[in-house]
Amino acid sequence: MGTARASAREARLSAFCQARFSFLTDTIIKVQALLKPPSAASAGALEKETNLPSFIRNPQDFWSGVIFLIFGLAAVIIGNDYAMGSAGRMGPAYFPTALGSLLAVIGAVSLVRSFIRHGEPIGRFAIKNLLLVTAAVLLFGLLMRGAGLLIATVVLVMLSGYASIKFKVLPFLAVAVGMAVFCILVFVVGLGLPMPIFGSWFGF
């Protein structure tokens, strides 16, 4: 009787150990499957799921075209609420409408080109460069009245150029000065817009 009980106890213990061992083995196999890198087929399937549709061959041109179109059309629509004026006597809507129309055309061309030409996928989002360009535009608006068009344009070009990996002080400074002179000749001398070349900080 005692031998039978011992045998039954050993059988239950053996079954319990086998069950625990099987559970442990299954767990290890599942963990290894999770840690194992995906195969080429699964990686390709994942890439197809996350990519744009196949008819969009150049994602960079596609998204830049969409952004240009949105901002350009928004400027044109907002400008419709103000007086247009003429080239010699610009109204408040003239410059935003002209710039918005040009931006929308560039966006449309970029959008069409994204369906024709092959291009690389979009890389990492450059937060630092975006902040530098945004700060340059804001500083241009803040410096226009106090420092004037000349200094505001130089600051705009230099600060936004600093976001480029090809930034060098002397070449970008030459471009900034040339751009400032060009803006003065076109907007102040040519069109007669009331933009101070040197602002109130310099006693003008």
Image: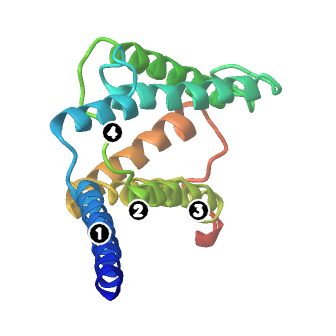
As displayed, is residue 101 above or below residue 91? above
- C-alpha separation, residue under disc 3 versus residue under disc 2: 22 Å
Q: Nearer the viewer, residue 49 or 174?
A: 49
Q: Which residue is mark 4?
A: 122
Contact, mark 1 vs mark 2 (Cβ under 8 Å): no
Q: Which residue is mark 3?
A: 143
Q: Secondary structure at mark 4?
A: loop
Contact, mark 3 vs mark 1 (Cβ under 8 Å): no
Q: Nearer the viewer, mark 4 or mark 3?
A: 4
**Residue type pointed to by label 4:** Ile
Q: Which residue is mark 1?
A: 24
**Residue type pointed to by label 3:** Leu
Q: Please tell me how many numbered marks the rendered image carries.
A: 4
Q: Nearer the viewer, residue 148 or 30?
A: 30
- Mark 3 burial class by Cα count in 10 Å: few <14, some 14-19, many 20+: some
Give the quadrant of the C terminus: bottom right
- State the residue at coordinates (29%, 69%): 24
Upstream in sequence: badge 1 or badge 2: 1
- Mark 2 burial class by Cα count in 10 Å: few <14, some 14-19, many 20+: few
- State the residue at coordinates (39%, 34%): 50
Residue furthest to the left in view is: 40
